[in-house]
Image: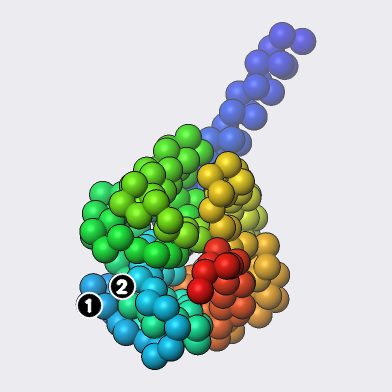
Amino acid sequence: MRIWFHRFIIAVLGAAIAAAALFGIEIILALQGNKEPPFVNPSHQPVHLGSAGSALVYVVLGDSTGAGRGAFYDDGIAIGTARHLALRHQVTMTNFSISGAVAEDVVKRELADAVALKPDIVLLSVGANDATHFTSGSALKSQVEVVIDSLQKASPSVKIVVTGCPQMGSIPRFAQPLRWFAGTQTTRVNSVFRSIAASRNITWARIADDTGEAFRKDPTLFASDKFHPNKRGYAVWMPTLNRALDSALKGRQ
């Protein structure tokens, strides 16, 4: 009985190690993806939109989703949301997003420039790379709160909207079971953003909850790299983002 049990344990451990190795290979292959031309991050030059209403300093921080990778820059969420805000405000939008950024990169590489502008409203579009890089919940919470604290110290009335992680379980580049696992990582990461939004009185734009199913059903919403949204994909996010921005600015003239 004891020999059988030992053999069983060895077999289970062997299968687990083999599965982990296969899973690791799948992750590497998925993250390498298709060979795409080098991506150029957005210029830090401000964009001015709108001619009526009060002046609004708008800053976008984050990763490739903020940078608009997968579409022409004008089709991404930074310009798209700025155009929406410009329906009621004179908007000066500056985009500091960096493709591939995790929350720690936002703190180290983007935050200082954003703080210097003392923005009225900020869109923080980050979380996807924290999911794929397995950033711990405590580290993610700490880094996002540094962003919030720094922005609020520079501009106490600043409104902050966070997207959290889009639904990584819908990404065509990920084969099963990696796609399922990516979905669990989305849930884990977004539980951190949900908690922060509730405790810090910031606005959470629920792009994973609101649009994940649409992306799962329609792979044509993705760019040729089968990872980032394309023009139509970003357009699917826009109603959720615009509602969140409007909610954050509610009552502002």
Residue shown at the point (26%, 49%) measured from the top left: 108
**Res. 11 image quadrant:** top right
**Residue 181: x and y, percent?**
61, 51
Residue occupying the far front of the picture: 253
Quadrant in which residue 118 is drawn:
bottom left
- Dividing the picture into quarters, in which one does residue 188 lie? top right
Residue 130 placement, left or right of 18: left
Residue 70 horizontal/vertical position (percent)? 42, 79
Residue under the point 71% across and 16% down: 5
In the rendered image, the vertical position of residue 212 relative to residue 137, given as above or below: below
Pointer 2 residue? 94
Q: Give the amino acid type for the residue marked by disc 1 in the picture.
A: Gln
Residue designated by label 1: 45
Proximity of marks 1 and 2: CB atoms separated by less than 8 Å: yes
Where 98 falls versus 193 (above or below)? Answer: below
**Residue 118 shows in the view:** yes
- If the image is split into quadrants, where does the N terminus sit? top right
Q: Nearer the viewer, residue 59 or 30?
A: 59
How far apart marks 1 and 2 lie (CA) works out to: 6 Å
The amino acid type, in three-letter code, at marker 2 is Thr
Q: Position of residue 245 (x, y in %)?
A: 54, 69
> Under tag 2, what secondary structure?
strand
Q: Earlier in the sequence, mark 1 or mark 2?
A: 1
Circle 1 — which element? loop
